[in-house]
Amino acid sequence: MSADSQTPLYRTKFSAFDNKTLEQRIQELADRDEIRELTARYAHSVAHRTSVADLFTDDGAFIIRMPGQPVHESRGREQLVKEYAKLEVSADPALPMIHNHVIAISGDEGQGICSVEIRVADNGKSMIASGYYEDSFRRENGHWKFVVRDVTIFHWVPIQEGWAKTAK
């Protein structure tokens, strides 16, 4: 959702450069690029079984919404470190492909939404999933970090089955 309304971020008018000086526009471009790089580093780290806890603020949260399962939340540095330590011992890494970024920045705070497609082995089966992340960002010590990374998965199915049966 956008910061000032109930309108989803992807439905708001793009106004990132409205009424800004050239210097402010350059800063906006730099901030947007750093946020996209943050999400790319997240995806590559997950695929290489490396913890991403350091990409979050100390008060950060990771929330997972999977079809037919209770919401799973990890909040705060200690829980994030434990959650992402599971990556390092995983036999089959998840391969997230993140794209379609929509980003809104206001000073040192930001909101974003992006799509994700995931390939993973689950109990010996090749699985495919897709969904989206709703993110909150904060600039800390000159760098952007996740405050909240909230993922909603549309489907998580064997690739041979496909997602057509689970589509709503």
Image (cartoon, rainbow, N blue to C red):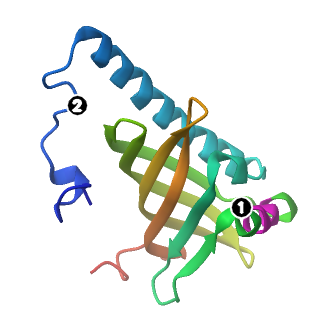
- Asked if residue 138 is among those painted magenta in the image, a careful observer would answer no
User: Of the residues shown, which amino acid type is indicated by label 2?
Assistant: Ala
Q: Is residue 159 visible?
A: no
- Side of 106 relative to 66 (left or right): left
Which residue is rendered at x = 49% and y = 44% of the image? 138
The residue pinned by badge 1 equals 77
Relative to 121, say whether 72 is above or below: below
Q: Residue at x 66, y 42 (%)?
A: 44
Q: Which residues are magenta?
A: 81-87
Please provide percent x and percent y for residue 143.
57, 32
Q: Nearer the viewer, residue 9 or 156?
A: 9
Say whether residue 150 is left or right of residue 83.
Answer: left
The mark nearer the N terminus, 2 or 1, is 2
Amino acid type, residue under disc 1 in the picture: Arg
12 lies above or below 75: above
Tell me the residue at 16%/61% (across/down).
7
Q: Secondary structure at mark 2?
A: loop
* CA neighbours of label 1 inside 10 A, class few (<14), some (14 to 19), many (20+): some
Between the C-alphas of marks 2 and 1, the distance is: 31 Å
Residue 78 horizontal/vertical position (percent): 76, 66
Residues at discs 2 and 1 in contact (Cβ within 8 Å): no
Q: Most extreme residue toward the top, as rendered?
A: 22
Mark 2, Cα crowd under 10 Å, few <14 / some 14-19 / many 20+, is: some
Residue at (43% x, 38% y) in the render:
108
Q: Is residue 52 left or right of residue 28?
A: right
The tag on residue 16 is 2
> Which mark lies nearer to you, 2 or 1?
1
Instruction: Give the quarter of the image for residue 23.
Output: top left
